[in-house]
Amino acid sequence: MKRLKYACPFGGKQYPFYLAVTAMVTAPLLCLSLDIIATVSSMLWAPAIVLVICFIIEQHLTPDERAIIAETPPPLWNYATEDVIDSIRASENRDARAELGAAAVIAFAVCFLFLVGFGVSAFTVTLCCLAVLCCIIAFVYSLWKSEIWAQVDDSAMYIDVPIHHMYDVKHTTTRGRHTWIMRESTVWYVSYLVFYLHDGRYTLKVPGGEGDRDIVRIIKYKNSIRWMLL
């Protein structure tokens, strides 16, 4: 359950990544008087420290949340029925296609942006190869995970947990190169759900188009775990 509990460590908020990038850029400037190893290593430990601090802040529980968790009993797991098994397989097929498509789009976007922006060089070719390698790794992982859930049987166990609340996180992208007046902004929202178990708060990203839901179903099978909305 730890993987599910920390699936969204920052609750969908973007400021930790902005702060991490800022730290990665500014830390080497503060280490210029030191040797090259310290300067380069600061690009790694500075954003890592920032992300850890943001993680601690976002995972902090309010008194009301602690009270809810204290009153929540341990879940009672049930063995999966045929209807549950069929819904798991259908959901996994949809998720696998979406993950493969997202990995391919990201790899293509990285290659296109670097080749167009910086031209063909050893540096850009290396980055493109890394992007393709990451896509291949994601593809292999998705196949491995799909194979596990394709074999799901009645030994799988599940629980239905009520969703405490849902919220939206605003995202904005800006387009235009000439002046700030001519820039166009695109705004969209990503939904997240929150529920509580006896061991803490869980925050999960809601797939697009799902809308408001009341129940999240959690399934365990062969040391793997997944969830779906009801």
Image (cartoon, grey):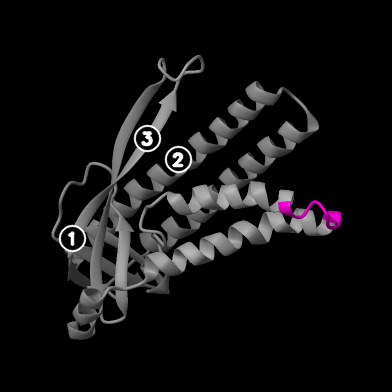
- Gap in angstroms between the C-alphas marked 2 and 3: 19 Å
Q: How far across and how far down the image is residue 21, in percent?
A: 58, 48
Q: How far across and how far down the image is residue 227, in percent?
A: 29, 62
Dot label at residue 218 = none
Q: How far across and how far down the image is residue 27, in percent?
A: 68, 53
Residue at the disc numbered 2 = 102
Dot label at residue 172 = 3
3 or 1: tag closer to the N-terminus: 1
Question: Residue at coordinates 69% horizontally, 38% vertically from top-left?
Answer: 127
Residue 116 higher or lower than 187, as above or below: above
Q: What element does badge 1 sit on?
A: strand
Residue at the disc numbered 1 = 165
| Image side of residue 61 versus residue 37, left or right | left
Range drawn in magenta: 30-36
Is residue 77 something that shows in the picture? no
Mark closer to the observer (3, 1):
3
Q: What element does badge 3 sit on?
A: strand
Q: Amino acid at mark 1?
A: His
Mark closer to the observer (2, 3):
3
Residue 29 higher or lower than 129, as above or below: below
2 or 1: tag closer to the N-terminus: 2
Instruction: Sort mark 1 into few (<14), some (14-19) or many (20+) by Cα contacts within 10 Å.
Output: few
Question: Residue at coordinates 41% horizontally, 15% vertically from top-left?
Answer: 182
User: Magenta stretch: residue 33 in it?
Assistant: yes
Q: Amino acid at mark 2?
A: Ala
Q: Amino acid at mark 3?
A: Thr
Quadrant showing the C terminus:
bottom left
Instruction: Sort mark 3 into few (<14), some (14-19) or many (20+) by Cα contacts within 10 Å.
Output: few
Query: Hey, which quadrant is residue 154 in on the image?
Result: bottom left
* Residue sticking out furthest to the right: 35
| Image side of residue 209 versus residue 140, left or right | left
